[in-house]
Amino acid sequence: MRTHHRILAVLAAAGLALAACADPPEDDDDEVAAPGEEYLACMVTDIGGIDDRSFNASAWAGLERAEEQNPDIEISFVSSSAEADYVPNLTGYVQDVECDFVLAVGGLMADATADVADRHADQQFGIVDAATGQPNVYPMQFDTAQAAFLAGYLAAGFSTSGTVGTYGGLPIDPVTIFMDGFVDGVAYYNEVNDADVQALGWDKETRTGQFADSFVDQAAGAAQSDALVAQGADVIMPVAGGTGLGTASAAQETGEFAVIWVDIDGCVSAETYCGVFLTTVVKNIPLAVEEAVLAASGADDLITGEFLGTLENDGVSLAPYHEFEDQIDDQLKTEIEELRQAIIDGEIEVTSPAQPD
């Protein structure tokens, strides 16, 4: 990544904590920026930080890809250490750095983004995992229930104990949508195979379950998975960002269970633990961010539309099985691929109260 000296200087002066059905976005004018004209695309992480091996890291990958595609794009990010940092960090990028595109990462930033965007109506913002309804905030959302449904079916079919589990970081829609799909996938496996695999950690009907209350506390993640293992779970899906690394570490140390990662292929983002990742429920955040920034950099006005990731447009998916490839029954693999196509074709409807509108 090229270093943009004006960004560094202004951020330092501002005192910011600097760390190094999808429809493509539409714009109101086909004219592009003049060659050599600089376009600043800036990202504010949530409290998970840039190295969360999850959604912050994948959003940053999207900015890097946009920079590679367009040499006139410069990129930067600032990490938030607390929720109180969201508004100052977003505001600093607008007022002090004068970024052209300001990206907020995660549903926890929705209120702060709406606040800052309301006060800067001409500024282009983007947000991952939320929609504020404002014309200057381009939303990137994902129907992860679809891919998590496949993961639940896989977990049920792979389990030898007859018990699988999941837990979240916080009880918010971008988290519970994964958990909804997962438990429904387990239920569907039971239905079509006359099985009785138990899914622990989340009750879709009552909207209650296990939460670590953090996206960064690895010890809390290990405690959550320990509780599930104590009840017999041999496949666990943490939906908790960096907190889930505690679960991956415990799986690696004990060899008692497999892990289903989320957001970005765990064997790419956290390759140290690849040996315990059965698969990953992938959100194609890099694609969504790359498309949005490239469109915005070539527009004379605010970009419109939205990105909604589904199985059909590869906005969500299951990652390869990597080191578990030979351990998963070929029939189970076939059933999962057939199930994927059935969801795309509308033969099976995956629902969640947390799905994007």
Image (cartoon, rainbow, N blue to C red):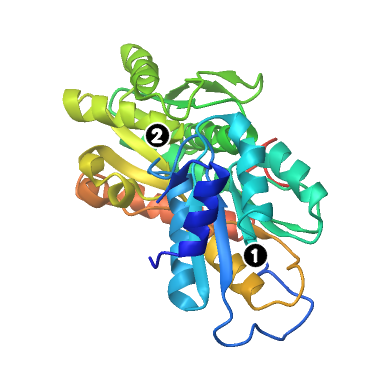
In depth, the one of 220 and 33 nearer the eye is 33
Q: Which quadrant would the N terminus be assigned to in this image?
A: bottom left
Q: Residue at x 60, y 57 (%)?
A: 97
Considering the numbered disc 2 on the image, is that residue within a helix, a strand or a loop?
A: helix
Name the kind of residue labelled 2 in the image.
Gly
User: Does the image show residue 180?
Assistant: yes
Name the kind of residue labelled 1 in the image.
Asp
Considering the numbered disc 1 on the image, is that residue within a helix, a strand or a loop?
A: loop
Residue 45's spot in the image, x, y percent? 52, 44
- Tell me if mark 2 has few (under 14), some (14-19) or many (20+) residues whose alpha carbon lies within 10 angstroms of its own: many
- Tell me if mark 1 has few (under 14), some (14-19) or many (20+) residues whose alpha carbon lies within 10 angstroms of its own: many
Q: How many marks?
A: 2
Residue 182's spot in the image, x, y percent? 50, 35
Side of 23 relative to 340 (left or right):
right
Residue 170's spot in the image, x, y percent? 56, 26
Disc 2 designates what residue?
242
Asked if residue 158 is positioned above or below residue 282 in the image, the reply reads: above
Q: Residue at x 66, y 62 (%)?
A: 21
In depth, the one of 117 and 357 nearer the eye is 117
Residue 262's spot in the image, x, y percent? 43, 42
In depth, the one of 233 and 174 nearer the eye is 174
In depth, the one of 186 and 281 nearer the eye is 281
Tell me the quarter of the picture where residue 237 sits: top left
Disc 1 designates what residue?
100
Mark 1 and mark 2: Cα distance apart in space? 29 Å
